[in-house]
Amino acid sequence: MPTLVSPSLLAANFLNLQADIDMINRSEADWLHLDVMDGSFVPNISFGFPVLEAVAKTCRKPLDVHYMIDKPERYIAQTARLGAMMMCVHAEATTHLHRTLQEIHQAGMKTGVALNPATPLCAVEDVLDDVDMVLLMSVNPGFGGQKFIPRTLDRARRLRQMIADRGCQTLIEVDGGVNGTTAPQLKAAGVDVLVSGSYVFAADDPIARIDELKA
Ligand code: DX5
Ligand code: ZN
């Protein structure tokens, strides 16, 4: 399967999101990654539904929504109304993960489960049949532009094996510090989807950066 690329809007120009979304629409990006933070689950606060709704109106790529918030199950219906393709929740942030995943599916979205760098892979093992994508955080969530944690490569390889052993179709996404150096290493480790914020949006030619990550 070719590698999918999901640029993270967190690194876009918030004074002119229209221009950056136009660029994403023209690009070969597969999805658009949207980082929602609540100042509780993570130290930072990013954006919420007023911004997501505006983005959803103009973005033609499937929306890959990454909730870094406590009790994300409170927002399943509202996220479905946006037309989001993927609702990704942190395993550490929802007490009844299995129920949350069922509710996301019932609402018509794909399920994502994100794991912080210190969370063992077994946190997702027993719900893997209900998970369309596991998001391995390769930085501690909350901020763009952080340094990639190398241990993520081993986590990706072990998760790939776990998925194969279970015979599921679950995708692996990696988020944080993805750039021209780490992307090939991640692909070799069996990662399906690369999220990239600063490497794409800080570039003079972001469309070329997206092509480079996909190639
Ligand atoms: C971090 C977010 C990421 C972030 C990645 O908490 O989940 O999606 O935007 O940014 P870069 O690619 O700059 O590390
Ligand atoms: Zn993210």
Image (cartoon, rainbow, N blue to C red):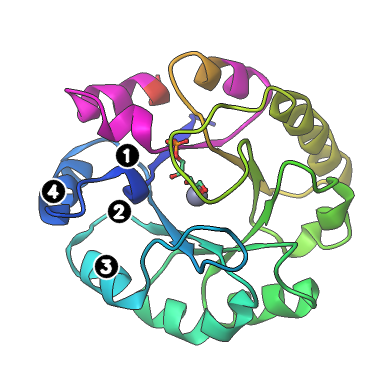
- Counting residues from the start of the chain, the first of labels 3 and 2 encountered is 3
Query: Are discs 4 and 3 less than 8 Å apart at CB?
Result: no
- Counting residues from the start of the chain, the first of labels 1 and 4 encountered is 4
**Relative to 34, residue 47 above or below:** below
- Counting residues from the start of the chain, the first of labels 2 and 4 encountered is 4
Q: The residue under label 3 is which amino acid type?
A: Ala
Q: Residues within 10 Å of mark 1 (few under 14, many from 20)?
A: many
**Relative to 9, residue 130 above or below:** below
Q: Residues within 10 Å of mark 2 (few under 14, many from 20)?
A: many
Distance, label 4 to label 3, CA atoms, is: 12 Å
Query: Are discs 2 and 1 less than 8 Å apart at CB?
Result: yes
Which circle marks residue 180 in the picture?
none
Which circle marks residue 61 in the picture?
2
Q: Residues within 10 Å of mark 4 (few under 14, many from 20)?
A: few
- Counting residues from the start of the chain, the first of labels 4 and 3 encountered is 4
Report the side of 175 relative to 116 (left or right).
Answer: left
In this rendering, the label closer to the viewer, 3 or 2: 3
Please give the range of residues in magenta: 185-212
Which circle marks residue 22 in the picture?
4
**Label 4 element class:** helix
Distance, label 3 to label 2, CA atoms, is: 9 Å
Q: Under 8 Å from ligand 2: the CB of mark 2?
A: no
Q: Residue at x 31, y 31 (%)?
A: 200
Distance, label 1 to label 4, CA atoms, is: 12 Å
